[in-house]
Every structure is written in structure tokens, then in C-alpha cells.
Image (tube, helix red, strand yellow):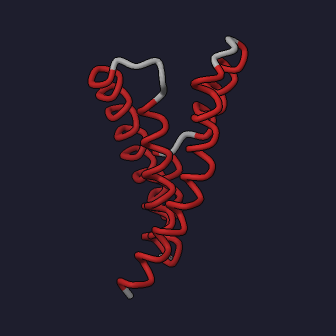
């Protein structure tokens, strides 16, 4: 049962952080481009890379709980589909490219940073 507590606590804080960052980014940038979702997912990719070597309760709290609730694959997919259906290619193509390529690159960078810290 303690595993679920770690995941739940992390999830609460991850979802709350995502919500607050999304609200802030909508006010700060006032852009049709989903800067909040992109920033969250790129930051999440980097941080998950850093956490890749963490085990035990800390991995459940931060990796599964916090990062699982912080990053948002479903929102990314819904936004991408909406831009596609509206034929907003100037948004959908860069959004897809930066999210996938940037996410992988930042996860690798996070893993490299973590290896330097050990």
C-alpha cells in the first residue's frame, strides 16, 4: 500500500504543477501555439532522463507519481488532432517535431547530466 501513497502524493503535486504552469503560460504568452503543454512535456522529458537511474520509493514519488501527472501525452495528442482538423499546419508540424525530437534529445541530456552527477 505504501507504493500507492508515494505515487499519489507525487501525482497530486505533478498535476497541480502542470495546471499552474498551463494557466501561467496562457496568460503570459497569449498564443494559439500550446507553449504550456510543449514546455511541460520537454521539461518532463529532461527530468525523467535525470530520474532514469533512481530506484525505490523516490522513483515512485518523483518518476511515476510527479512526472506521470506532470507530463501530458493525452493533451498533446488532443491539441495536435485539433490543429490537424483545422488544417493549422504552421502549428501542428512544428509542434509534432519539437515535441518528439526535442523530448528524446532532452531525455538523453537528462540521462547524461545524471551520469555526471554520480
Quadrant location of the C terminus?
bottom left
Location of residue 55 in the rendering, given as x and y in whole percent from the top left corner: 51, 77
Q: Residue furthest bottom?
A: 118
Residue 82, quarter of picture = top right
The one nearer the camera, 115 or 15, is 115
Q: Give the residue at x 58% y 31%.
A: 75
The reply, left or right, for residue 18 in relation to residue 101 is: left
In the image, residue 52 above or below residue 65: below
44 left or right, relative to 84: left
- Relative placement, left or right, of 116 versus 27 is right
Residue positioned 29% across, 20% down in the render:
27
Q: Is residue 113 above or below residue 32?
A: below
The residue at the far right in this view is: 85
Q: How far from the left and from the top, in percent, is residue 86?
A: 67, 11
- Residue at horizontal 58 percent and vertical 35 percent from the top: 94
x then y, percent, for residue 29: 32, 24
Residue found 45% across the figure and 83% down from its top: 115
Q: Residue 12: image x %, image y %?
A: 40, 44
Quarter of the image for the N terminus: give it: bottom right
Quadrant of residue 113 in the image? bottom left
Where is 50 relative to 15, above or below? below
- Return the residue nearer the eye: 16 or 7: 16
Amino acid at each position: 500500500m505504501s507504493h500507492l501513497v508515494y505515487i499519489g502524493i507525487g501525482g497530486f503535486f505533478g498535476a497541480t504543477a502542470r495546471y499552474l504552469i498551463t494557466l501561467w503560460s496562457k496568460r503570459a504568452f497569449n498564443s494559439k501555439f500550446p507553449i504550456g503543454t510543449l514546455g511541460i512535456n520537454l521539461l518532463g522529458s529532461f527530468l525523467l532522463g535525470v530520474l532514469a537511474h533512481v530506484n525505490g520509493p523516490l522513483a515512485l514519488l518523483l518518476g511515476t507519481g510527479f512526472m506521470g501527472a506532470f507530463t501530458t501525452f493525452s493533451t498533446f495528442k488532443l491539441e495536435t488532432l485539433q490543429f490537424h482538423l483545422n488544417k493549422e499546419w504552421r502549428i501542428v508540424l512544428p509542434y509534432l517535431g519539437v515535441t518528439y525530437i526535442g523530448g528524446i534529445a532532452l531525455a538523453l541530456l537528462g540521462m547524461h547530466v545524471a551520469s555526471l552527477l554520480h
